[in-house]
Amino acid sequence: MTDSTLNPSDLWIQTVNLVKDRVNHRSLWEAMEQAVGIAIEQDTFIVGLNPRFFNQAGHLNVSAHKNAIENAVKDLTGRPLKVRIIEGDTIDDWNYTKQRDARIAAMREATYQRKDREEAEAQSWDTLIEYVAREYSNTPLRQLPQSRARFLTRMLYVVSDAMDTLYSENPDEAVERHLARVIDRIANVTDTPATIVALELDRLRAWRQQSAQTS
């Protein structure tokens, strides 16, 4: 016989009795006797253990035991419910757990967004490096110093344009390293010291900024 109107506390008491009839495991029984039913939210039955007894939570979370508990809950309520074991035995403990879950989820989402952004930026910088290599391969008479000089000048403008999107006002270390890789690639193919390439790039951006302010 099922009863979907049982309150969480009574539901857990009946669940304990039903599991005892089905599973012969004294440690599981003892752990269940220390736990209390706290709340039912959506499709989850929240069961709490006082912090003094939370070391027994492992007995409740063993796959076979948890299946037995959830099957008993389903038989008693007439609907499937996931059982979640939390530390604490009051509704305040459950509210605190939900707040902690929300903070963790927010931090995880922020981490994912940062990683996604970093990966997207890395792909953009990598694309820029590939562009430099491809354009150099297509440069006529690239073994001549004047051809390399012209290529260097053109790439400085290309990188400066890319920096307007990829290089923020306060770049972090990862962005600085991405830019350094691009500079190193230009320096390698043009046989120019990387510091000189960086210097000329800074000069170009400063000139562009000054021109924009005076126009």
Image (cartoon, rainbow, N blue to C red):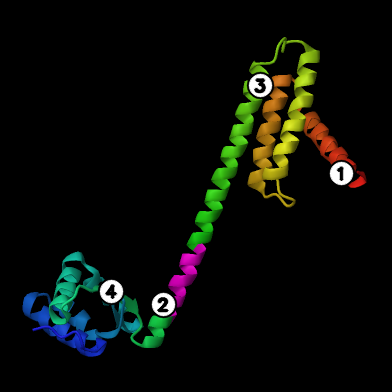
Which residue is the site of mark 3?
135
Name the residue: 85% across, 36% down.
Answer: 203
**Front-lying residue, 81 or 86:** 81
Q: Is residue 181 visible?
A: yes
**Front-lying residue, 106 or 56:** 106
Q: Secondary structure at mark 3?
A: helix
**Is the residue under label 3 in contact with that under label 2 (CB below 8 Å)?**
no
- Label 2 and label 1: CA atoms lie apart by 54 Å
Q: Secondary structure at mark 1?
A: helix
Q: Amino acid at mark 3?
A: Glu
**Is the residue under label 1 in contact with that under label 3 (CB below 8 Å)?**
no
Residue at the far right in the pictured view: 214
Residue range in magenta is 96-107
Mark in front: 2 vs 1: 1
- Label 2 and label 3: CA atoms lie apart by 56 Å
Q: Amino acid at mark 1?
A: Ala
The first of marks 4 and 3 along the sequence is 4
Tell me, for residue 212, which label it has, or none: 1
